[in-house]
Image: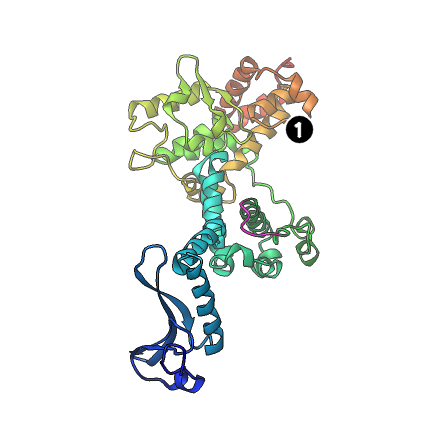
């Protein structure tokens, strides 16, 4: 018998008890075995019942299931609770407060996919267009998420990153390199938020760099195929036989030597029809600097044709008339021209550059400005403060005339270079 006059619980009794409800322990006042009957049979757990020294109300606090805590252990726990009560402390209130405090300081563990999505949302403000965000999300969705997506970031190891990269490292080297860089960026983001400690598992500076062959030694730079400039007239004549907005946008791209994204996202507010200048804002440029392009007579003709049927804020809208055309629109045009299907839109910048270098006397600096290329030499970049717009007006008009000229006349023009443009 216990101090309360009730029978003290025994190990055998608590393991076999089938009396549903509470059975008090005669040895430790307040300690009870709680038995419940469910679909899977009997469950047994420990409960300490007491009167709160703070409110005077009856309360109870769970001490865990019998499967985890034996009789001797819970008697010690109940004794500790009784001592707290004697000191004027409510055991359940104290435990709830401690639990809340631990939850407040414990960092939220994110899965890799959750961390990636938050990282992308943060970094997208640095990117110039929605295409970059889409590429980030698409490569991670395709290659990283199937292996890493559901894992908490603090469980991502170098071995798991290697499992993502090894199958594609030698056959899709450029893509694999981008995937690795993006995983590394996500993990850097997570580390900065103290979601894990230690080295970044996707960094090449660690062991990963020793386990993968150097990318530059297994992949060759593949330049965009460029149409020989001698064929540009024939190409544009064939282009003009095609109907729709896409062929017009393609010719405009050729005449301005601009990038596909710059043309497809061109807005009317960027065009000064009086000055005949197209000003692309810095946020849409690869180099992050505003770029002015003088519009030749033929380029202006295309602009005015589009203006006559204006449907939206975009100069070259998609068929709905509400948004810009997709990145595949120009590629689809050239793929539909069998004689030129091996070329790509971006390659026409090289066509322009080759023509200018071979058939004109414009300074290299002027040509680089026309292409909005970044100057790597800091001294030269500091010296070059103007964009030579007036010189480039002459350059782009000469280019437009060449594009308009048939092959026989083009040979003569090629042999008769313009005077040196200072």
- The residue that appears at 63% across and 17% down in the rendered structure is 384
- The residue that appears at 43% across and 84% down in the rendered structure is 10
Q: Residues within 10 Å of mark 1 (few under 14, many from 20)?
A: few
Q: Which residue is mark 1?
A: 376
Q: How is the structure coloured here?
A: rainbow
Quarter that holds the N terminus: bottom left
Check if residue 406 falls in the magenta segment.
Answer: no
What secondary structure predominates along the stretch shown in magenta? loop
Asked where in the image residue 167 lies, by quadrant, the reply is bottom right
SS of the residue at dot 1?
Answer: loop
Determine whether 236 is above or below 58 in the image.
Answer: above
Asked where in the image residue 225 lies, by quadrant, the reply is top right
Determine whether 394 is above or below 220 in the image.
Answer: above
Closer to us: 301 or 321: 321
- Magenta span covers which residues? 193-197
Expressed as whole percent of the image width and height from the top left, the position of residue 342 reads 52, 44
Expressed as whole percent of the image width and height from the top left, the position of residue 18 reads 32, 84
């Amino acid at each position: 018998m216990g101090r309360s006059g009730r029978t003290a619980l025994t190990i055998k009794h608590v393991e076999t008890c089938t009396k549903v409800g509470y059975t008090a322990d005669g040895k430790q006042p307040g300690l009870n075995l709680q038995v419940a009957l469910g679909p899977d049979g009997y469950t047994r757990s420990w409960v300490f019942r007491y009167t709160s020294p703070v409110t005077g109300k009856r309360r109870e606090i769970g001490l865990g299931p019998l499967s985890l805590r034996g009789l001797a252990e819970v008697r010690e726990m109940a004794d500790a609770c009784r001592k707290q009560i004697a000191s004027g402390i409510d055991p359940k209130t104290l435990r709830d407060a401690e639990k809340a405090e631990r939850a407040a300081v414990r960092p939220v563990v994110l899965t890799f996919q959750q961390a990636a999505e938050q990282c992308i949302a943060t970094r997208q403000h640095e990117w110039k267009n929605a295409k970059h965000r889409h590429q980030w999300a698409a490569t991670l969705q395709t290659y990283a998420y199937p292996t890493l997506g559901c894992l908490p970031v603090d469980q991502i190891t170098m071995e798991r990153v290697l499992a993502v990269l090894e199958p594609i490292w030698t056959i899709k080297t450029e893509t694999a390199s981008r995937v690795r860089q993006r995983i590394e960026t996500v993990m850097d983001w997570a580390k900065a938020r103290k979601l894990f400690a230690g080295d970044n598992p996707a960094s090449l500076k660690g062991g990963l760099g020793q386990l993968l062959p150097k990318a530059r030694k297994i992949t060759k730079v593949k330049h965009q195929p460029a149409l020989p400039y001698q064929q540009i007239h024939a190409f544009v004549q064939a282009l003009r036989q095609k109907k729709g907005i896409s062929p017009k946008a393609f010719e405009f791209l050729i005449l301005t030597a601009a990038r596909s994204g710059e043309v497809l996202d061109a807005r009317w507010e960027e065009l000064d029809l009086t000055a005949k200048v197209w000003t692309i804002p810095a946020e849409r440029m690869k180099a992050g600097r505003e770029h002015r392009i003088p519009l030749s007579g033929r380029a202006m003709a295309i602009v005015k044709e589009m203006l006559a049927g204006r449907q939206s804020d975009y100069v070259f809208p998609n068929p709905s008339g509400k948004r810009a055309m997709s990145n595949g629109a120009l590629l689809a045009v050239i793929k539909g021209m069998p004689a030129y299907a091996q070329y790509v839109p971006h390659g026409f910048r090289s066509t322009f550059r080759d023509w200018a270098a071979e058939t004109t006397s414009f300074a290299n600096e002027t040509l680089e400005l026309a292409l909005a290329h970044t100057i790597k030499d800091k001294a030269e970049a500091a010296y070059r403060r103007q964009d030579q717009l007036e010189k480039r007006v002459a350059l782009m008009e000469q280019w437009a005339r060449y594009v308009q000229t048939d092959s026989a006349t083009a040979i003569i023009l090629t042999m008769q270079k313009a005077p040196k443009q200072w």
